[in-house]
Amino acid sequence: MTHQRSRTLHSWQEATRVYLKQQVVTMLFLGFAAGLPFLLVFSTLSRWLAEAGISRTLIGFFSWVGITYSIKVLWAPVIDRLPLPGLTRALGKRRSWMLLGQAGILLGLLAMASIQPAEDIGLFALAALLVAFSSATQDVALDAYRIEIIAAEYQGAMSAMYIGGYRLGTLVAGAGALYLAEFYSWAVAYSVMAALMLVGMITVLLVPEPVHLISRATYENEARVIRYLEGSAHLPDGLRRITAWFIGAVVCPFMDFFARNGSLAITILLLISVFRITDITMASMANPFYYDLGYSKVEVANYTKLFGFFMTLTGAALGGILVVRYGIMRPLLVGAVSVALTNLLFAVMAWTGYDLRFLALVIGADSLSGGFATAAFIAYLSSLTNQAYTATQYALFSSLMTLVPKILAGFSGIIVDLHGYVFFFIYASVTGIPAILLVLYLMRHNNVDQADDVKAKPGQA
């Protein structure tokens, strides 16, 4: 394992004061810039298209622009390796790519605001695709920046502040855009959203570029590229350069991960792929569930959006503090258990029926545990990366963590139709058991490694 081998036990005061660090505060603004475009190419956009008279079939096809978020690992190596002419020299590798992504989002939103979807749906779709692609690009660079700008022990707080900013961005892009569209127009709403991207762009211009530290193992790994160049002199220069770049940018990041984690690499990847199954599976049926129980749109908005927003922030903040205090693995275990258990509360609610007080209890528990688990999980993913390949490796992890859950979530409606909501939420809770077992296994292996280290160095025990 590459994380949590040795760490300083911080006091509660030190753990709490982590949220005053400049790097941590910065993540609130960068998280806002990351969260803002997400709903503008999803649920908010679907409402605009519906009001414009676009068919439900075509609206469904528009959801495919979101595939860019799941395949961003394909161009993450480019972001890791390719400098932007002029911009990288002025801002550095991470900030230049963040700024480019933010500029693409701003331009794409302005283009959407200037097009009537009913009049030119093709051009409108291209503008939406530009927003989604630029947003995914910003995410890759931003994740790399977040990991590299501060020590691993503070990644819990960084992820908590990022979640807070991200949720604030989605709140503005959701409720805020709807209000603007209601009282003014969709063009005004998307123009205002475009202007709000300046928050992220100004932040990028003000923050420092991370120091890129390359380990000896990484240099040895990169030596494979040099050996390839030396042994392929018979090939055309263009082909040699392209192949060498591919080895360094794509092959080496994957080889590095497996080399550092050894026999545990597959177990870690399994954990990443199943950790979010429970909450993503449940979320796919949440709104139909509220509707079938008789909750109005206003009640759902008040409890799940506003109240849930603040409870999520509270959970994320608590998760960040406990990661600093106790390390990553124990909070990760607590998060996995709590997310699975809160799904059982939804099963109880499905059995008891409409009850606003119980809805508040369930949403509070679900949002608190979800924020806590997400903060710990992002910190865990961050601890797995090598700074030489931060963007590529984290993009791989973040893509993998949603792939299996989204596939399983597609069958959620079938389960509800066949067996009802009570069975479905129990099923969703049970899907969290593999993640719990994998965390326990990795914790046990980590303890064994620490014990071996003590035996090897008895004078330091």
Image (cartoon, rainbow, N blue to C red):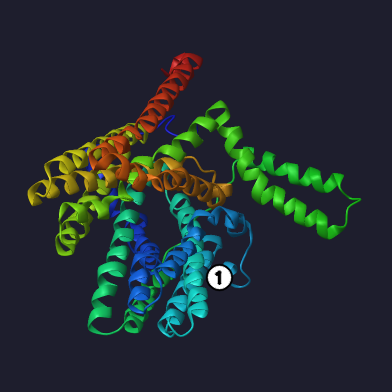
Q: Which residue: 51% across, 71% down?
A: 130
Residue 198 place in picture, x, y as percent: 39, 75
**Which one is nearer the viewer's eye here, 375 or 366?**
366
* Residue found at the very far front of the displayed protein: 418
Q: Which residue is mark 1?
A: 90
Closer to us: 277 or 318: 277
Do we see residue 9 in this rendering?
no
Quadrant for residue 300, please give it. Answer: bottom left
377 versus 108 height, above or below: above
Position of 408 relative to 188 (above/below): above
Q: Is 441 on the left-hand or right-hand side of 100?
A: left
User: Which is nearer the eye, 49 or 183?
Assistant: 49
Which x, y percent locates residue 426?
A: 27, 35
Note whether residue 387 is visible.
yes
Return the x and y of residue 48 as percentages of the image width and height.
35, 75
Residue at x 48%, y 47% (from the top left corner): 403
Query: Residue placed at 21% from the left, 39% from the top?
Result: 347
Vertical placement of residue 155 versus 36, above or below: above
